[in-house]
Image: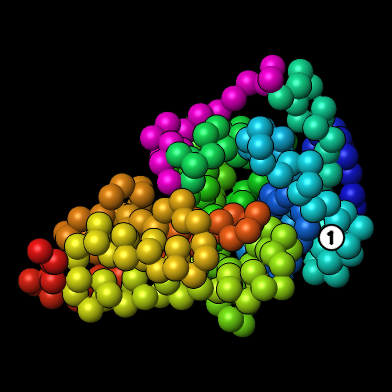
Amino acid sequence: MHTVRTIADVRSMVRLWRGQGERIAFVPTMGNLHAGHIHLVNQARRRADRVVVSIFVNPMQFGANEDFASYPRTLSEDSIKLAENGAHLLFVPEAGELYPRGVAGATRVEVPGISDILCGASRPGHFTGVATVVNTLFNIVQPDMAVFGEKDYQQLLVIRRMVADLCLPVTVVGVPTVREADGLAMSSRNSYLTAEERARAPQVYQVLCQVRGRIQDGEADYAAIEAGAEQALIAAGFRPDYVSVRRAEDLMPASVADQTLVILAAARLGKTRLIDNLPIELKNRQQNPIISV
């Protein structure tokens, strides 16, 4: 595996592979890699001849009081994992390489609407930072495809919308969430959890499963279901930002007529913000769903 730090070096390697007729897959990350990231790399290897991975803790997507300074940086360990799992190129740029005029002076990419709800409401400007850096990385690497985890479901839809609107020649591949044995979605920020918090953290997934079960049983008063789920999280010691039942294709509020849904949640436990989601298909919904009165 080659490790490079400059745009010129990435383009030189990609140009060589392109000349050999090889397909390129890209996995952008912020490092502190876990088994979920490695699963993305493995999925990329199955789909392409060459796999490029980036590690960049992007300052533009962190708010003023968020964890940019303390975000785990584990480059040596990450490099070993990537080499052992077949990555071909690791791009580790400094901030100045991607933002030569600084973050404040950088051109930005905004995806309106879908960026402003759910996590976008809780973290203003976050998805502008995500869209900007991913667009920049796409322009540098110029991959045939890019692989993202579905745990960050809203992020995945923001990137898909950006790719469609800007006519970027990149296929965006979503990969189902990788979970711990107790159901907790794998995340680099799980390392912030204390032992006691780690024992409680899977309750986010359990609440999502309960919501899915209620909907599959025919309940359709989504506002009541969401409120009940938030109360369950509060009772378990979480501080929920939201639990929401949305239309999977665009994250608009779900209606009884919608059949392809996603249930999303964000909640804080101690200093850690956990996010998770579950898809749900309702092709066999009964004709008269149960609506609370």
Residue shown at 88%/40% (left/top)? 5
Where, by quadrant of the figure, is residue 7 drawn?
top right
* Total marks placed: 1
- Which of the two residues, 7 or 178, is positioned nearer the viewer here? 178
Q: How is the image coloured?
A: rainbow
Residue shown at 25%/57% (left/top)? 223
- Residue 112 on the magenta segment: yes
Residue shown at 83%/51% (left/top)? 73
Q: Position of residue 238 (x, y in %)?
A: 51, 62
Q: Position of residue 46 (x, y in %)?
A: 66, 68
Query: Looking at the image, is 260 positioned above or below residue 212?
Result: above
Residue shown at 92%/58% (left/top)? 76
Residue 37 seen in the figure: no
Q: Is residue 53 left or right of residue 8?
A: left
Magenta segment, principal secondary structure?
Answer: loop
Q: Is residue 26 left or right of residue 109?
A: right
Q: Position of residue 272 (x, y in %)?
A: 64, 56
Q: Is residue 231 left or right of residue 238?
A: left
Q: Secondary structure at mark 1?
A: helix
Where, by quadrant of the figure, is residue 42 drawn?
bottom right
Query: Looking at the image, is 39 positioned above or below residue 88?
Result: below
Three-letter code for the amino acid on which mark 1 is drawn:
Asp
| On-image quarter of the C terminus | bottom left
| On-image quarter of the N terminus | bottom right
- Which of the two residues, 226 or 4, is positioned nearer the viewer here? 226
The stretch in magenta equals 104-118
Q: Position of residue 203 (x, y in %)?
A: 51, 73
Which residue extends farthest bottom?
A: 181
Where, by quadrant of the figure, is residue 58 drawn?
top right
Residue bearing the label numbered 1: 78
